[in-house]
Amino acid sequence: MSRVPLRKALADLPAYVPGARVPVGAAAYKLSSNENPYPPLPSVVVAIADAAVDVNRYPDMYATELTAAIAARLGVAQESVVAGCGSVAVLGHVLTAVCEEGDEVVLPWRSFEAYPIAVELAHARGVRVPVGADGRLDLARMADAVTRRTKVVLVCTPNNPTGPAVRDDELRAFLDRVPRDVLVVLDEAYVEFVRDPQAPDALALFAEHPNVVVLRTFSKAYGLAGLRVGYAVARPRLANGIRAASTPFGVSHVAQLAALASLRAEGELLTRVEALVAERVRVLEALWAQGWAVPDSQANFVWLPLGDHATTFAERCARAGVLVRPFAGDGVRVSVGEKEATELFLEVAAAHAPR
Ligand SMILES: *Cc1c(COP(=O)(O)O)cnc(C)c1O
């Protein structure tokens, strides 16, 4: 029987496993997808409702007002900001804009599970460099892995799912070693949660290095995961290439207006981020006191390196009413959410602590 063949690469593609969802009618907390537990602000809901009446029209293709507001907020040129349907889509556009068949993309592993998929879909080849037992990226080894075939290096900081951010000094040393025709993507999906004084200022590095692209998102700190808005900051020539590779009208009108309203309400939203950071610190300290070797997370989640016990631990959490994200054979990632939820998780953790 003849049938339409799918691209061969698809068969080998790792599946993106979404965090478990709460079944309809069940009582459980969802700490499995690094979402913001707070509901949208009333002012953001009003912007969403106002935008709804215009959805018979296509959105502003280049999200002009939004990219202008982001550029002003970050102190970069508007032509350097490319918005997309979540920063995960923007990453895909970045890769398709620069990768030729067979080019290498150096990436840390374990890291964001979308990376290997995006790399394969861009016809490139992923070169994985192990993350240390302390959950930190090994930037020296990542620089060693750069060859003449390398087109892009992905730097996830803080690293999802392990939590630590890279240090400014090690990232600078890394950038000094990477050739200027290799793109370095700084994926800062959790930058608003970083409190480590040694963490880099990605925009300063972007100003100094023409081969640096910064990815950020409204999904985590700004609580707009369901509306899909993220962006890249890149030199204008690269930004134009990313735009050319983007899905036309990728950011909906509703999403554009919600993101603009979120920037206007930034003070209120960042107060919530502060509360989540305080809760992260409380969770980390409780886990350390229980004897867990948990990396010092700078994001809105913590990582338990449970190895072969990851799946059973996640099942125990689910029975206690909290959904967490297991990575089989490796560990469990737990998002920092409502205090009631983190309390339930800490009870399960205490019962299974190493000592
Ligand atoms: C969540 C996340 C993103 C972005 O997600 P979008 O919702 O697509 O903006 C990007 N990178 C990492 C490492 C993430 O964890």
Image: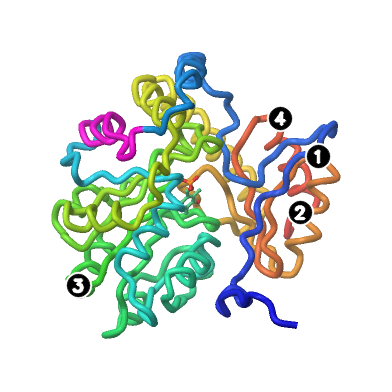
Q: Is residue 249 above or below residue 65?
A: below
First of labels 1, 2 by sequence position: 1
3D distance between C-alphas at marks 1 and 3: 48 Å
Magenta stretch, main secondary structure, is: helix
Q: Are marks 4 and 3 in contact (CB under 8 Å)?
A: no
3D distance between C-alphas at marks 4 and 2: 17 Å
Q: Which residue is mark 1?
A: 23
Horizontal arrangement in the rendering, residue 225 relative to residue 258 (left or right)? right
3D distance between C-alphas at marks 1 and 4: 19 Å
Q: Is mark 4 within 8 Å of ligand 1?
A: no
The picture places residue 292, in percent across and down from the top left corner, at 65, 56
Magenta stretch: residue 202 in it?
Answer: no
First of labels 4, 2 by sequence position: 2
The picture places residue 294, in percent across and down from the top left corner, at 58, 56
Q: Is mark 3 within 8 Å of ligand 1?
A: no
First of labels 1, 3 by sequence position: 1
First of labels 1, 4 by sequence position: 1
Q: Is mark 2 within 8 Å of ligand 1?
A: no
Magenta stretch: residue 65 in it?
Answer: yes
Please tell me how crowded label 1 is: few (under 14), some (14-19), or many (20+) other residues with Cα within 10 Å: few
